[in-house]
Structure formats: C-alpha cells, structure tokens
C-alpha cells in the first residue's frame, strides 16, 4: 500500500516537473519569437487590423465564389491596396510637398508670422487685452518670434525625416510587403487561426467564446470610431479650407484629422485660430463660413457618424479615449493612436466578462449606478 502511494506521489511530482518545464519553454520561445518579429511590429499590427476590418468583405466575396478562398482573399487584398494603401501614399507625397512649400514661404518672408500677430492684436477688442496680459500672451511679437523659430525647426525636422524615409525606402517597402503578405493569409485562414488560438487559450469555453466575440467587436469599433472618423473629418476639413482659398489645405486637413482623435481637443484646435485670423484680417465672410462649417459640418461628423459606425454599446467614454490615445502615442509613437484605445477597449471588455462571470456565480452586485 505504501509503495503504491509512493509511486503515485513520484508520478505526480514528475508530471508537475514536466508541466513546469513545458511552461518555461512556452514562455522562453514566445519571448524569443516576439524579439524576432519586433522589427516588423507595425507591419504585423496593421496587417491584423486590415484583416479584421475587411473580413466581412472577404466573407461576402467567398459567398459569391465558394471553394475559392485564395481568390476571395486576393480580391480583398487588391481592394485594400486600392482603397487604403495607394491613397495613403499619394496623401503622404502631397503632404510632404505642401509642407515644403509652406516652409519655403516662411523662409522667403512671404509669410511673416510677427506681422500676422500684429494684425490680430490690432483687431482684438479692448476687453481681451487684460486676460491676455495675465496669460503672458499680449506681447504678440515675442510670441510670434518664438512660434516662427518653432515652425522653422519643425519643418527642418520634417525635411530631415523625409530624407531619412527616402533613404529607408527599402525598409518601408519590405514592411509594406510583410503587412500585405500577412493580411492575405489572415483573410484566407482567419477562421481557422481564430479557432486554433481559441483552443490554446486557457479559459473556460463560455469565457473563451465571450472574450473572442468581444475582442472582434471592440477592435472593429475602436478602429471605426477613431481612424475612420478622423479620416472623414480631415477630408471634409481639407476640402473646406480649399474652398475658402486658404493655403495649405492638405496640411490643415491632415492636422484636423489627427486632432480629431483627441476628444477633449478635437478639430477646433485647428480651425478656431484660423477663423480668428480671418476675422482679424477683415475676411469676415470667410471667417463666418469657416465657423459654420467647423461647428455644423466637421463637428457634427463625430456626433452623427461615430454612433452609426461604432454603436452606443461599444463606445468608450471620451476621457478614456483621450488618456489612452495620449499614453499610446507616448509609448508606441504613431502606432499608439490605435494601440492605446484598443488596449483600453480590451481592458473594459475583459473586466465586463469577469464581472458577468462573478454575477453568474452568485456574487452580490455592488449597485447599479448609471453614468451621467
């Protein structure tokens, strides 16, 4: 009897040792693979995002051409290239050209920032002088000189970065190729890969299904609610600036799209100063049209389009979007625009699933409090 118990204990001990060693191997090789693919992190990220966003399109194509997954995935990939990749490259080229032209205008003196500020100062009402003095903003000439130096430095940096990008064209092409290559296989084998990952996830079946369903919803909602809305607002803003004859319409449109990702800031940080300048320089009609367009066209896009694209159930609070976007930019650079809100959305999703499981298990709820 004692020998049987001793043998069972030795067997359990050996199994625990083997399981522990397997976990160590799993951890080590996962970290090793992460280090290997780290140089292509951005390409992998955007490949996964593109596959998730265009998966419904791929399913429709597959329904039209059954038993031809390669053809459906290839057509979807061509659609991504035509709708996303080519316009993005053309926009980047136009933006670089416009930024260079603006820099040349500043350097040649055609755009004199101190003179512009003096015009605004002369047009300000008397009641605005004292608050500006308290904020240290009434000495417009000194502020303008600093801004001009900042602008010159920024454009110099942009020119340097553009040169570096030109030198690293091969790396860019390689990353783009990796992204498109990965997107093709994710579109073709997405269902199978999702099933395999789901099987490998150490969760109960109900939790696993709820988590994966919620992940797809929040990722798609995050992308639609941020990037798509930002693109549309930037496009509308650029067209409005172009129609009003304001130089640098592409640059202003891109800036409006970028700032629209920040709920507490929004596109107003771009068009409001321009409207003030138009009023100060006597372009009253253009100023009124810009204010109207900023409030009732660009501003309403977020209020009208975001609920349609995202849905009210998956929309995150604005303060969460703001903090997670800024934090993502700080940690991950440009990719943080998507990574920050996505991590916040997944955080909320996981906690929602955990709370539901607790309530199902019979835990008493802390109370039903509806946010304002």
Image (spheres, rainbow, N blue to C red):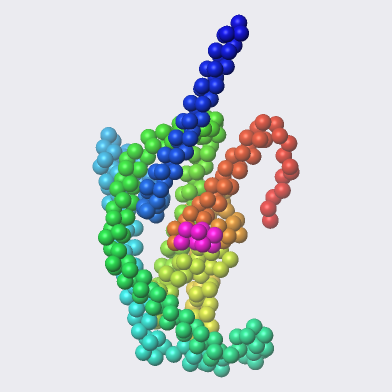
Quarter of the image that includes the C terminus: bottom right
Would you place residue 225 above or below residue 241 in this image? above
Magenta stretch encompasses residue 145: no
Q: Nearer the viewer, residue 288 or 28?
A: 28
On screen, residue 162 versus residue 321, left or right, reads left
Q: Nearer the viewer, residue 133 or 10?
A: 10
Q: Position of residue 147 (x, y in %)?
A: 50, 83
Quarter of the image that includes the N terminus: top right
Q: Which residues are magenta?
A: 326-333
Q: Position of residue 351 (x, y in %)?
A: 61, 43
Would you place residue 321 above or below residue 137 in this image? above
Would you place residue 159 above or below residue 203 in this image? below
Q: How many marks?
A: 0
Residue plotted at (46% across, 66% down) = 258
Magenta stretch encompasses residue 329: yes
Q: Position of residue 36 (x, y in %)?
A: 37, 47
**Residue 344 appears in the rendering:** yes
Prevailing SS of the magenta stretch: helix
The part of the image, by quadrant, that contains residue 242 is bottom left
Q: Nearer the viewer, residue 275 or 134?
A: 134
On screen, residue 184 versus residue 26, left or right, reads left
């Amino acid at each position: 009897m004692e020998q049987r118990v001793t043998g069972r204990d030795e067997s359990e001990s050996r199994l625990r040792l083997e399981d522990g060693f397997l976990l160590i191997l799993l951890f080590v090789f996962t970290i090793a693979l992460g280090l290997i693919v780290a140089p292509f992190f951005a390409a992998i990220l955007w490949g996964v995002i593109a596959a998730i966003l265009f998966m419904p399109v791929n399913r429709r194509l597959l329904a039209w051409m059954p038993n031809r997954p390669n053809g459906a995935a290839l057509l979807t990939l061509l659609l991504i290239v035509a709708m996303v990749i080519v316009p993005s490259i053309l926009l980047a080229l136009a933006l670089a050209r416009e930024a260079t032209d603006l820099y040349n205008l500043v350097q040649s003196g055609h755009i004199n920032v101190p003179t512009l500020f003096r015009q605004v100062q002369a047009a300000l009402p008397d009641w605005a002088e004292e608050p500006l003095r308290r904020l240290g903003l009434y000495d417009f000439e000194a502020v303008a000189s600093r801004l001009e130096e900042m602008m010159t430095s920024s454009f110099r940096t942009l020119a340097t970065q553009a040169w570096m990008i030109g030198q690293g064209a091969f790396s860019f092409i390689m990353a783009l190729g990796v992204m498109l290559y990965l997107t093709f296989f994710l579109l073709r084998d997405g269902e199978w890969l999702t099933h395999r990952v789901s099987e490998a996830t150490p969760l109960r079946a109900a939790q696993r299904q709820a988590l994966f369903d919620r992940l797809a919803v929040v990722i798609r909602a995050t992308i639609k609610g941020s990037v798509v809305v930002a693109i549309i607002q930037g496009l509308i803003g650029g067209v409005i600036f172009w129609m009003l004859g304001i130089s640098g319409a592409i640059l202003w449109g891109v800036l409006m799209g970028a700032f629209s990702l920040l709920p507490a800031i929004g596109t107003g940080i771009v068009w409001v100063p321009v409207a003030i300048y138009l009023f100060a320089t006597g372009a009253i009609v253009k100023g009124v049209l810009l204010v109207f367009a900023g409030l009732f066209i660009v501003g309403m896009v977020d209020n009208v389009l975001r609920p349609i694209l995202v849905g009210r159930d998956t929309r995150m609070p604005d303060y969460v979007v703001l903090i997670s976007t800024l934090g993502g930019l700080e940690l991950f650079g440009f990719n943080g625009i998507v990574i920050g809100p996505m991590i916040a959305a997944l955080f909320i999703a996981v906690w929602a699933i955990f709370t539901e499981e607790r309530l199902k298990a019979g835990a008493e709820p802390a109370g039903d409090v509806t946010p304002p």
